Amino acid sequence: MEILVCVKRVPDTAENEIEVNRDGSDIERDDLVYSVNEWDNYAVEEAIRIRDEVGGSVTVATVGDEDAEEVLRREMAMGADNGILLSDADFAGIDGRGIAAILKKAVEKGTYDLVLTGALADDGAGQVGGMLAALLDWPYASVVNSIDILDDGKIKVGREIEGGNHEINEIDLPCVLSIQTGINEPRYVGIRGIRKVASVEIPVYGAADLGLSAEAVGARVSRVDYFVPALGAGAEILEGSMEEKIDKLIELLKAKGGLK
Amino acid sequence: MAGQVFAYIVHKDGVADDTAAELLAAAAKIDAEAPVTAVVTGAGAELDGVCNSLTAFYPEVWKIDNPALAYPNAEIIRKALVSILPAGAIVLLAYDTFGLDLGPGLSIKLDGAYVADAVDFEGMDGSRLKVVRQEYSGMVSTHVLCDLSNGAVLTCRPGSFQPLDTTTAAGKVVDKSPDAGDLTVKRRYIQVVEAEKGDVDITKSDVLVSVGRGIEDQENIELAEDLAQAMGAVVSCSRPIVDAKWLEKARQVGTSGQTVKPKVYLALGISGSFQHLGGIKGAPFIVAVNKNPKAPIFQVADIGIVEDILEFIPELAEKVKESK
């Protein structure tokens, strides 16, 4: 099985407080720690497991600038066989549809049976996988939390739906799936693993290499600004020492029936 | 003005989803004058019941009745919608696991723009709609402009658009089934597997001690269990704890887990994503403890405490035990 996993380099929300910059044009990027999007890491792990079970290869691709290469290397250290960086000055300011158009060209350069994305990323849109599938005219399933390979032509996938229930589908290959967190336990990547792939060559494809017109990646959705919404009443914040806060909290919990 | 506005309505067991009224309110924020058409897919009498209920507030309800649509398979529904919708249509969907499945691909096939998880619309700027969204798990908000001139698919966060005082629409149902076209697809629905029941039913507890990512390590779960025991409460959690397999799925509060209605909810190291908050009903007394003063949970909590939960929980447990 030839598998392509689309990944994204994002600010690590576990390591950073995300704040709006002074003029609201962007988030504050100084001193941000970046990592691979959490959902994508599960997608790469799943791809590696499938390859190890049925054979084939795993390629990771990302759309971004030269800094994005580090997430490709990280996922290659995890076990992906190849990386592809999709980068071009013309890609600045593109929307989700533009990303999907670029990825479509990258998919068509290979002979993939399965394309995986993370179900969501930092912008919470969850859009690229579904758009890519529609552009390729391949079937799609989102928020996937289980994959069973049935044969060369079809797989069984579980989707996470509301209430913790699972929706089971059979889907023909080739297809695109967006992967939910929790589908597996992504393996740990150590410094040694990263070092091993440090000198592996990663091809870079631009708009011309992919045969992409400016029109194909033209944005229909554009950002105006970032802002922090005017807050409602919000919580009453308890002040004082830890002990004072705890005494006050216990009083409140007793009054509200929180202590039995 | 932009194209005709449609709201795709999700339903279950013969009842339209709560978002049916919310999408109508969202449409009014795009253009208060434009009529909005509900679109419903399904099969048989159950579908008819849903359509009839929607005529109370939608002036027109388009139904597509087909045995292939008995279960909402987004791949099939997309084909049907592409067949019946006019060029330039603006389609509103709820942002849930079905909206995630249908929306992006539908926008491509309709050749329209796509914006996911809108929390508000702030009017038109020429042909572009100003949309409010959140990014980075709700830590910041953003305005985006979405060009509606070629149509669009917009998914709306459940609970964000307040339903209008519904005037009686006395709408009509229009049967679009004959226009749905070929509905064969390469993804076949097999079954829904219900969530496994855990050893504890968190939905039955009046007091929940709920832990999130801030608990940091599996062995720290014990701290929460100790506190819960002292309080006479039950331990629940947010999604990352289940993903890490530190607690069972049945303990997860949220749209993809359990819906709970406690009297008191103690949120420990939980940032407060809308998917998590969507699982808390009945307006409990919420206490949030988080070391990040900007965590979105503080916007919805009654009481906030800015502390590291790993220090706070053991101290609180100790004091609770003493206070008895």
Image (cartoon, rainbow, N blue to C red):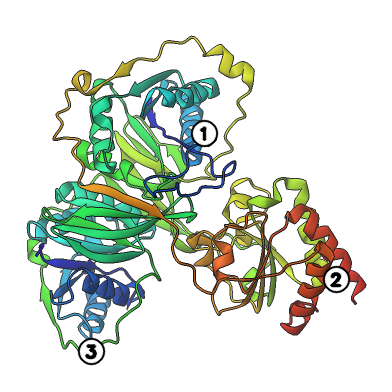
- Up-down relation of residue A188 to residue A245 (above or below): above
Discs 1 and 2 share one subunit? no
- CA separation in Å, label 1 and label 3: 50 Å
Observer-nearest residue: A66 or A110?
A66
Q: Horizontal and vertical percent for residue B27?
A: 22, 70
Mark on residue A35?
A: 1
- Going 51% across and 32% down the picture, which residue do you hit? A45
- CA separation in Å, label 2 and label 3: 52 Å
User: Label 2 near label 1: C-beta < 8 Å?
Assistant: no
Amino acid type of the residue that numbered disc 2 sits on in the rendered structure: Val
Which quarter of the figure is the N terminus of chain B placed in?
Answer: bottom left
Are there few (<14), some (14-19), or many (20+) residues within 10 Å of tag 3?
Answer: few
Q: Is residue A164 left or right of residue A226?
A: right
Q: Horizontal and vertical percent for residue B55?
A: 20, 83
SS under mark 2: helix
Q: Horizontal and vertical percent for residue A143?
A: 42, 49
Are there few (<14), some (14-19), or many (20+) residues within 10 Å of tag 1?
Answer: some
Observer-nearest residue: A72 or A139?
A72
Amino acid type of the residue that numbered disc 1 sits on in the rendered structure: Ser
